Image: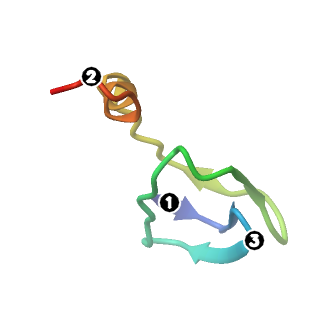
Amino acid sequence: MVLSGTLVLQLGAQRHHIAGDQCAEFDTLVPHAFGAEGGPADVLLIVDRAAGRGHHDDGG
């Protein structure tokens, strides 16, 4: 969630601008990068450490 400023989120070949009070959710298997645009940005990141389990085929 962007608390202030603007975040540029690169997901593969797509580029998204996320402004204050907006958020994004994405599959972390997609190549990604992010950074502030036009000045500083305050961002709240929520990362689920168990989410990595979803990236592996456990045969079940």
Disc ID at residue 13: 3
Disc ID at residue 58: 2
* Disc 3 secondary structure class: loop
Badge 1 or badge 3: first in the primary sequence: 1
Q: Give residue 34's position: percent from left, percent from top.
A: 71, 54
**Residue type, mark 1 in image:** Leu
Badge 2 or badge 3: first in the primary sequence: 3
**Residue type, mark 2 in image:** Asp
Q: Give residue 56's position: percent from left, percent from top.
A: 38, 27
* Disc 1 secondary structure class: strand
Q: CA distance from mark 1 to mark 3?
A: 25 Å
**Residue type, mark 3 in image:** Ala
Question: What coloring was used for the rendering?
Answer: rainbow
For the residues labelled 1 and 3, say whether their Cβ atoms are less than 8 Å apart: no
Badge 1 or badge 2: first in the primary sequence: 1
Q: Residues within 10 Å of mark 1 (few under 14, many from 20)?
A: some
Q: Give residue 31's position: percent from left, percent from top.
A: 68, 50
Tell me which corner region of the image, top left, top right, bottom left or bottom right, holds residue 23: bottom left
Residue shown at 66%/77% (left/top)? 17
Image height of 14 relative to 48, above or below: below
Q: CA distance from mark 1 to mark 2?
A: 37 Å
Residue shown at 76%/59% (left/top)? 36
For the residues labelled 1 and 2, say whether their Cβ atoms are less than 8 Å apart: no
